[in-house]
Image: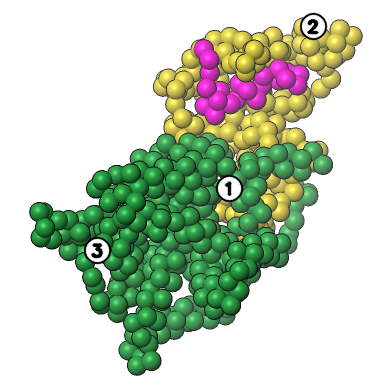
Chain colours: A green, B yellow
Amino acid sequence: MGKGLSTRSPRGMVAGGGLRHAGWAASVAIVVFLFLLPLLPSVTNSTLFTLTLMLTTVGVAVNWNLTGGFTGYVDFGHAVWFGIGAYTTAILVSLQSNGPQIGWSPIPAIGLGALVAGLLAAVIGRATMRLKGPYFSIAMLGTFVAMREIVRVSGVTGGGVGLTLPPYLNRPLFYYIQLVLVVALVAFTWWLRRTRFGAALVAIREDEIGAEMRGIDTTHFKVSVFSFAGFSTGLFGGLWAYQNTFVDPDIAFVEVRTVDAVMSTMLGGLGTVAGPVVGAVVLYWLREVLWANLLDYHLLTQGALLIVIVLFIPRGLVGLVDRRGTSVTALWGHWLGRRADRQKREDET
Amino acid sequence: MTALLEARGVVKRFGGLTALDHVDITVGEGEMVGLIGPNGSGKTTLFDCLSRVSNVDAGSITFDGTDITRHRPHQVARLGMSRTFQVIRLYRDLTVSENMELSIQWEGLGASGLFTKTDPGTRRRVESLLEFLLLAPLRNERAGVLSGGQRRLLEIGMALMSEPRLVLLDEATSGVNPALVVEIADRLREVNRSGGVAFLLVEHNVGFVADLCQRVVVLDQGAKLAEGTPRRIMHDPAVVEAYFGAEGEVRK
């Protein structure tokens, strides 16, 4: 009895209690600091706008992580939901009737923008999430490009010229709105990961056929989370459009937004709660501070960073202490469908 | 014996190759049935069709009186059929316990069940099955680091977690050391006797099948070659020829 079975002591999957408590304390301290930040006399509206844009990057990365990191569906077109949220908001707030503005007030417009993005994500996700690995990724990239071109030629969107929104001045208000949203989104992700629903998403990433055969309605789970991510990124899109006071197809639908989300999540830790937050902040800081001095080489630096992550920290910065996520290399294996082949080789040796 | 699983005239083609050619198979309530045949005879393909991982080109499959020919795998699982795979399918980045917790019966969970943590009842069942399958000391290990035999045991545990009425076991002893094969046989027999769980086993280990099963079905080149008790099958000249050629014999 028990032959061949290891009796090693259970290995902790997460950092020890002390480190975990320190992480919680640091998180609370950072959030309190961010809430108090606008009260400091040295913080200008310009600084607040930069921080608001950083919060946007964080929010989009957290949403991308729900489908890419937790569920294993690597979405190369995630920025499409940002663009749809931004444009729906822009159209609604800049409505005119023979001259006078009859536009919606920003909050319901932004809310409807998010809803449209979420509903479209549910419809498009139901079709594209039948595809696996690179096929899904490319289908989403195609969706992104197609949507941008539809917006470019459509009348209601202002075509290639874009739309101008009413001016807005209250930077602290929108900073606080986005800060609350990001904190709520991270708390939601933390909670979701601990539920059976969140665990089912990870099961889909690890082995979709196995998950389906063990009673998980994989279509329902993955389309639901994809739709939520679309809704939430649409929300950030609407907030961005209102603050930017101008949208056109090339700034609302920009590939870099997806690239930033992917890079942030990889850098911070795929499939972890804190990973995309840490990754997005580090990436943003690198871009603002370091890359400002290396303008000609910033893309080279970005590529080099990606190589460093894959080679030296495949589980990301957060993955160094929290092993509950996954690594870039494992996700790459799932993406290419190599998992079964690799295991078969292991079984044969 | 009432038929729990009944497949009639199952046909599966891959391009010009007919992998299954009008195969009939039944498994009764609480029965242990072996499915044997040479490599490439269509055993795993039949498993894939029965568990709805693959579509059939013709024929019908009913489980517990429900026509499941067009069902999706999760629907079949929720009706009470579970399976293991020839190439083991685990959630490698999750712990042994988490793998088990994710293999519950999902039918009827509802939103309240989906958006909660694992309940104490499920944890107790996980712990008891891990003890039963000798995996309790490994409960917090990542599934990806287990040995081949441990992974086989874990996959069997996951198949039993949902309290199924029928388990399809695809080469449960492949890559497992002989001592553990005996343990697996004992465990399966106990589950069958105490829980009334039916098993359909694909196996290359003919002795394992003969020990456990009341009935054996033999496939050869996608068609049913023979069916009967293990003793009868082992002395069937057509089976002996299919396995070892005209001069061979099947040894227990």
> Is disc 3 in contact with disc 1, using a CB cutoff of under 8 Å?
no
The residue most toward the bottom is: A41
- Report the Cα–Cα distance between label 2 and label 3: 85 Å
Residue kind at label 1, given as amino acid type = Glu
Amino acid on which the number 2 mark rests in the picture: Pro
Q: Are marks 2 and 3 on the same chain?
A: no
Q: Please state which of the two labelled residues, at mark 2 or mark 3, is closer to the viewer.
A: 3
Q: Which mark is residue B54?
A: none
For the magenta stretch, what is the residue range?
A: B36-58
Name above or below for residue A144 compared with residue A288: above
Disc 2: which chain? B
- Where residue A39 appears, as percent x and y from the top left, is 32, 89
Secondary structure under tag 2 reads: helix
Q: Is residue B116 magenta?
A: no
Image spot of residue B230 (x, y percent)? 72, 17
Is A152 positioned to the left or the right of B23 in the image? Answer: left
Q: Nearer the viewer, mark 1 or mark 2?
A: 1
Residue at image mark 3: A165
* x, y percent for residue B196: 53, 31
Q: Are marks 3 and 1 on the same chain?
A: yes
In the rendered image, which residue does mark 1 sit on? A206
Give the position of the C terminus of chain B as an image quadrant.
top right
Q: Are marks 1 and 2 on the same chain?
A: no
